[in-house]
Amino acid sequence: MTDATGQKYMFGVFQGSRWIVLLFVLLVVGCSSEPAHYEGAFSASQQVKGNSESISVPMDVTWGAVLEVLSQQGFLIQQADSKSHIILANREMRSKEDKDLSHTIAATVTLFPSSNQMTRVMVAANQTTELHKKSYTWWHLLWLIPVFPTGTEYTTVVVERDTVRSPQFYSDFFWAVKKLAEGEKESAQSTPKG
């Protein structure tokens, strides 16, 4: 009888100490996690490559070209401040592969004159991908068999949100701005004044 009581006691101690060890391990693992990702936001590895370009056209011509390119590509201009030379624009697109997904691109374009005939253009863009789900609520016969739908529920879930890092995105934008701005500059120079 004492052996059984002793074994029961030892089993109880072992069970209790196992929980203490488990809690200690969880505490150590939780406190030793890596620092938050935002702490490295200004490190060299986080720089977006190709998101700025110098355009050999005056500021006013470049400003108009940027607005025109954004509008031609389906971006909605949210704000265009000509004093601070900042443009906020966004575009929503349905995914071609999955009709339940949509992408929103929010872009901030900043312009500043490098000289009389040179404008520096910088773009920062973020992409948000959302999943759109549609589900039906059903009337059930005897609480088991769904008979007909009584309503529809729509749910939107953000699947991904990140900075646009694609060099192609930025190079396409700058190519279109340069082409348009240089064309406007040439037409302005060929028009006789007077």
Image (spheres, helix red, strand yellow):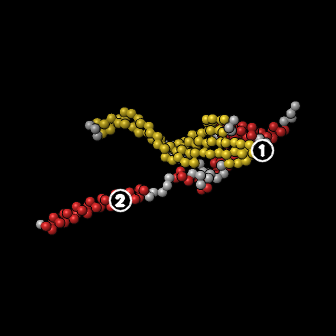
Q: Residue furthest left?
A: 1
Q: Residue furthest bottom?
A: 3
Identify the amino acid type marked 1. Answer: Ser
Secondary structure under tag 2 reads helix
Residue 30 is drawn in which quadrant? bottom left
Q: Nearer the viewer, residue 102 or 116?
A: 116
Identify the amino acid type marked 2. Answer: Phe
Quick check: can you spot residue 72? no
Query: Which residue is tagged 2?
Result: 24
Instruction: Nearest to the eye among marks 2 and 1: give it.
Output: 2
Residue 151 is drawn in which quadrant? top left
Q: Which residue is at a point 68% across and 38% down the rendered structure image?
A: 85
Q: Nearer the viewer, residue 101 or 70?
A: 70
Query: Residue 75 at what x, y percent from top left?
Result: 62, 38
Residues packed near mark 1 inside 10 Å, few (<14), some (14 to 19) or many (20 plus): few
Residues packed near mark 2 inside 10 Å, few (<14), some (14 to 19) or many (20 plus): few
Position of the N terminus, as image quadrant, is bottom left
Asked if labels 1 and 2 touch by Cβ distance under 8 angstroms, the answer is: no
Q: How many marks?
A: 2
Q: Nearer the viewer, residue 80 or 21?
A: 21
In the rendered structure, the answer to whether residue 88 lies left or right of residue 5 reads right
Quick check: can you spot residue 10? yes
Q: Which residue is at a point 13% across and 67% down the rendered structure image?
A: 2
Query: Residue 7 at what x, y percent from top left?
Result: 19, 66
Position of the C terminus, as image quadrant, is top right
**Residue 153, placed above or below residue 22:** above
Q: Which residue is at a point 71% across and 42% down the rendered structure image?
A: 112
Q: Which residue is at a point 55% across and 48% down the rendered structure image?
A: 162
Query: Which residue is tagged 1?
Result: 115
Residue 184 is drawn in which quadrant? top right
